[in-house]
Amino acid sequence: MSLPRIAVDAMGGDEGVRVMVDGAAMARRRHDKFKFLLVGDETRIKAALETHPGMAGASEILHCDDVVGGDELPSRALRRAKTTSMGLAVNAVKQGDAGAAVSAGNTGALMAMSKLALRTMPGLDRPALAALLPTLTDDDVVMLDLGANRECDARNLVQFAIMGAAYSRIVTGRERPRTRLLNIGTEETKGTEDIQAAAETLRAATGLAMDFEGYVEADKINRGECDVVVCDGFSGNIALKAIEGAARFVTDLLRNAFTSSLRSKIGFLVSRPATELLKHHLDPNNHNGAVFLGLNGVVVKSHGSANAKGVANAVEVAARLLEDDITNRIKQDLGAIEPASVAAK
């Protein structure tokens, strides 16, 4: 399949142009069909491309030296959407000059620009930020919303479940992803009125390409017992950062333990294959690439601190969503549920 090119905000992220171009080049080495629109300072992009000769014929540069700041208010960044590298990358998707946009910049600004330029899909109230998290099994778990919507009603949660299941079918290959709502307990009486109403709607709905299995608590997210975890953006963002913090805590604890004495260092050498496997599994760069689901176009958010491998993974996420036509999948799934059943009860 011939993919539309991917617009890369080369100025976003902690490391900027070098890492974004290195990541795009790494993705192209894995998949030589990828083509790019690199948005940012032309001089710096050309300098970064010098170390990747194979990228020259697969890339076009759109010059722009205006950058959205990492702590810039989304409302302020939105007013500069037509002059910043982030805004121009998203606009390329709107204009059809690219099939997807990838940025490691300010999350709030990226969501605001994407929503304004691409608009929310018909039948959806709000887009959601979804990401893949590692589990004890071979498959990752899709979790959404992770911060795009601080407060959500039952209708929003039902729509997030539909979008998350569509995404999960692409990344796991499951025809009916196991879907659960994040809650403070697994009993049917637990949770807020909105969570309970969303659960009631999902249990009663027919024709959805998912198996709704009730609730999941935060300590079970990474157990591999479900494929999609649905929540409001406030709870999701807290849960995500707690998981990321716990992963860093474990790796730092192991590092300190293995360097505390000569015996520990010898023990590290013996157990190195196992610790390297653990490090690989917990490395956020291996799961990089959060997706704004529910827009009329594909936008992928790379972690700001991602290295080249992480950026490459974000590019590959964008390409996979284009290949599997995530937008139409969501449209079809929304049409499979009765409008009345989507509404909050």
Image (tube, rainbow, N blue to C red):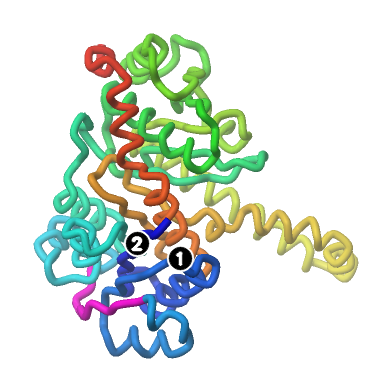
Could you say whether the residue bearing mark 1 is in a helix, strand or loop? helix
- Label 2 close to label 1 by CB (< 8 Å): yes
Q: Earlier in the sequence, mark 2 or mark 1?
A: 2
Residue 102 tag number: 2
Residue 231, percent across and down? Answer: 39, 31
Residue type at mark 2 is: Val
Residue 134, percent across and down? Answer: 58, 45
Query: Which quadrant of the figure contains the C terminus?
Result: top left
336 over 203 or under it: above or below:
below
Task: Residue 147: say if magenta.
Answer: no
Residue 62, percent across and down? Answer: 23, 77
Q: Is residue 134 left or right of residue 268?
A: left
Choose top left, top right, bottom left or bottom right for residue 238.
Answer: top left
The residue drawn where x is 39% and y is 71% is: 14
Residue 33 tag number: none
Which region shows up in magenta? 59-68
Q: Which residue is mark 1?
A: 311
Q: Nearer the viewer, residue 224 or 31?
A: 31
For disc 1, the neighbor class at 10 Å (few under 14, some 14 to 19, many from 20) is many
The residue drawn where x is 36% and y is 56% is: 301
The residue drawn where x is 21% and y is 59% is: 96
The answer to whether residue 307 is visible is no
The residue drawn where x is 35% and y is 36% is: 329
Q: Nearer the viewer, residue 217 or 330?
A: 330
Choose top left, top right, bottom left or bottom right for residue 49.
Answer: bottom left
Residue type at mark 1 is: Val
